[in-house]
Image (spheres, rainbow, N blue to C red):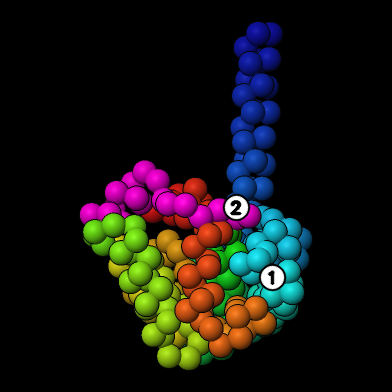
Amino acid sequence: MKAIRSSLLAVIFAASAVMCSNSNAANNENNNFKNKETMKFEKVALPYATDALEPVISKTTVELHYGKHHQAYVDNLNKLIVGTEFENADLETIVKKSSGAIFNNAGQTLNHNLYFTSFKPNGGGEPKGKLAEAIKSQFGSFDKFKEEFSAAGVSLFGSGWVWLAKDASGKLSIEKDSNAGNPLTKGLTPILGFDVWEHSYYLDYQNRRADHLKELWKIIDWDVVGSRY
Ligand code: MN
């Protein structure tokens, strides 16, 4: 009886662990899991209220950027993959292997999932732990890294992203990618990405991209970003 009870408990435990990991996976920032009922990609849930990042990013910009731009990329991706080899693929695989419109919309879906989960109200400060050590050893100091990262974002011509990425050995690099680019396509892992498309800052900062990038450091969630390293 005791054995039956404990094996029953083990089954219940295993089942709840599976359910738990599924729900974590559904909330995974890379959102590689599709909604099981609709079998469609969904954008990552916003981990704060739309006005929580003010004054760095206004409520209006979050509503438009997350609510309209990000949604459009996800909706387009879901339409475009129907009947293609990517229909049942996860998001990272699509980003690594696709091209053209599918790549653009998959890249932007992944990029914005990473972007919107990199912030929190009253964030900022400095990274901790291993990421902090790696930044210090490779860039000299956190301030030097910020300077170099921001300069890369300012100098990127047109629309795109500036990324902090790592290679398989943990070596960090700053990557500039046009349009929907993501370091994954170069075999690197994205750690932190700043969106330099005008839609991310134009309502709040007009043409002052440098000012916008400077302000973003105040809302970084270094716990989340550090966990990607
Ligand atoms: Mn954007």
Instruction: Give, as a single range, the part of the protein colored magenta.
Output: 120-137
Is 136 included in the stretch rendered in magenta?
yes
Kindly tell me whether residue 36 is visible in this rendering: no
Front position in the image: 57 or 172: 57
Amino acid tagged 1 = Ser
* Label 1 neighbour load within 10 Å: few <14, some 14-19, many 20+: some
* Label 2 neighbour load within 10 Å: few <14, some 14-19, many 20+: few
Res. 45 image quadrant:
bottom right
Front position in the image: 171 or 8: 171
The spot of residue 174 in percent (x, y) is 33, 71
Apparent side of residue 214 relative to residue 54 in the rendered image (left or right): left
The spot of residue 168 in percent (x, y) is 29, 59
N-terminal of the pair, mark 1 or mark 2, is 1
Apparent side of residue 91 relative to residue 184 in the rendered image (left or right): right
Kindly tell me whether residue 201 is visible in this rendering: yes
Helix, strand or loop for disc 1: loop
Label disc, if present, on residue 122 of the rendered structure: 2
Residue at x 73%, y 63% (from the top left corner) = 51
Q: Which residue is mark 1?
A: 58
Extreme residue toward the top, this view:
2
Residue at x 24%, y 59% (from the top left corner) = 140
Question: Is mark 1 in CB contact (under 8 Å) with mark 2?
Answer: no
Number of marks in picture? 2
Is 228 included in the stretch rendered in magenta?
no
Amino acid tagged 2 = Asn
Residue at x 35%, y 74% (from the top left corner) = 175
Q: Is residue 42 above or below residue 206?
A: above
Front position in the image: 139 or 64: 139
Label disc, if present, on residue 28 of the rendered structure: none
